[in-house]
């Protein structure tokens, strides 16, 4: 969910500030998700999952997208159920591929997998 627009080329960003911005974007998406129509929600979830499927993400971006999937699943509840089969393998893949010492990504992945099954009806 980190934006790579023209501003990044003009300014030198502090990595801590980028992490904070990405975290705020994840929380904002989670806060807005319950108000999205089903097609809009599907588009947002598909965007997150397609970024994770690409597989060429930096660890910081991977954490943001995994956390975004978790935030969306918690925010919309049962409406996330139709994305369950695509989301779980991706989240588990990123948890297994996390670099040594990248406990934050593993923790996010674990939180996502813990929140997903309760939405299957």
Image (cartoon, rainbow, N blue to C red):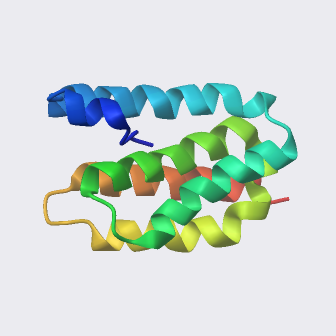
Judged left or right of residue 110, residue 40 is right
Residue under the image location 33 percent in, 73 percent down: 96
Residue 78 seen in the figure: no
Quarter holding the C terminus is: bottom right
Residue 90 lies, in percent from the top left, at 50, 70
The image quadrant of residue 77 is top right
The quarter of the rendered structure image containing the N terminus is top left
Residue 41 screen position, x and y as percent = 75, 45
- Res 26 seen here: yes
Left-right relation of 54 to 80: left
**Of 2 and 8, the residue lying toward us:** 8
The quarter of the picture where residue 110 lies is bottom left
x then y, percent, for residue 109: 43, 57
Foreground residue among 82 and 25: 25
Residue at 67% x, 35% y: name it. 75
How many circles with numbers are drawn on the protein?
Answer: 0
Relative to 8, say whether 51 is above or below.
below
Left or right for 61, reference 82: left
Residue 119 pos. (x, y %): 75, 53
Seen at 36% across and 42% down, the residue is: 4
Out of 121 and 13, give the one closest to the viewer: 13
């Amino acid at each position: 969910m980190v934006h790579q627009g023209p501003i990044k080329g003009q300014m030198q960003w502090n990595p801590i500030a980028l992490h904070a911005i990405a975290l705020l974007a994840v929380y904002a998406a989670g806060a807005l998700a319950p108000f999205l129509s089903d097609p809009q929600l599907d588009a947002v979830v598909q965007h997150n999952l397609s970024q994770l499927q690409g597989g060429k993400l930096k660890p910081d971006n991977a954490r943001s997208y995994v956390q975004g999937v978790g935030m969306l699943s918690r925010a919309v509840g049962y409406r996330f159920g139709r994305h369950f089969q695509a989301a779980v393998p991706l989240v588990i893949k990123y948890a297994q591929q996390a670099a040594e010492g990248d406990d934050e990504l593993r923790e996010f992945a674990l939180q996502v997998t813990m929140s997903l099954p309760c939405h299957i009806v």
